[in-house]
Amino acid sequence: MAKKQTVSALLLGQLALGSIARAQTAPVTAGRPAYVRLGVGTAHDIYGYYPCTRLSAEFAPMLSRKIGLASRVVGIVGKPSSGLETQLPNQNYRAGYLEQEVVFYPFGNDHRVNVGLGAGGFFGYYRRNSNSYLRGVNGQVTEYELASQKGFHGGGLLSLNVDVALGEKQQWRVGGKATLQNGISGNTRSSTYSLTLGRRL
């Protein structure tokens, strides 16, 4: 009886050790993470006359190791910082956009440093408070007439994205984004630059 119990214990031990070994050597299936990102950077008003501040919030799911999506809400605010326009009241720019990109990661998106190339489009609404007539003498405004432009604006975009993972778990990522936009009206071609902070969900 004792011999049978010993044999049974040995068999159970071998089965347990085999299960542990298989668990340790089993391949780990790569997941498809998603990220939320916040960005702050620079852009221009719709006519490219003066720089503005660009703020963004983004949701970016990864479809595969080399392909991801990025859906983004963007706000742009600014006003003239030089020239006679700075002496006028109510000179400013406000815009809100939705952006959608497909991002290709040529080296994969599972590294500590990721490089992505994006392509997509944007659409939104802007309002630019400016002037239709301005006259100055010796650097001082003497006559002016206020005006404003507003409407919808959209087009295509290309982007270069680089980010670096932080810490051992690589849950947070910091990086930079450069975008070239080609609009259907106004300033037909403009560039934006942003610093980003992302977190893996």
Image: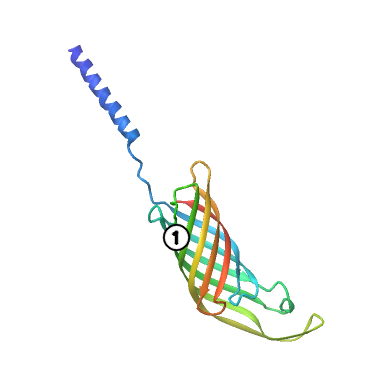
Q: Nearer the viewer, residue 108 or 185?
A: 108
Q: Would you say 136 lies left or right of 177 here?
A: right
Q: Would you say 10 lies left or right of 50 here?
A: left
Residue at 53% across, 50% down: 164
The image quadrant of residue 16 is: top left
Q: Would you say 55 lies left or right of 65 here?
A: right
Residue 134 position (above or below residue 4): below
Residue 142 position (above or below residue 169): below
Q: From the image, which quarter does the N terminus lie in?
A: top left
Residue at 60% across, 62% down: 41
Residue 191 rendering spot, x and y as whole percentages: 57, 68
Instruction: Check disc 1 and report its element: helix, strand or loop.
Output: strand
Residue at 54% across, 65% down: 179
The image quadrant of residue 95 is: bottom right
Q: Which residue is mark 1?
A: 103
Which residue appears farthest toward the right when viewing the image?
Answer: 138
Residue at 58% across, 78% down: 127
Mark 1 is surrounded, within 10 Å at the Cα level, by few (under 14), some (14 to 19) or many (20 or more) other residues, namely: many
Q: What kind of residue is marked 1? A: Val
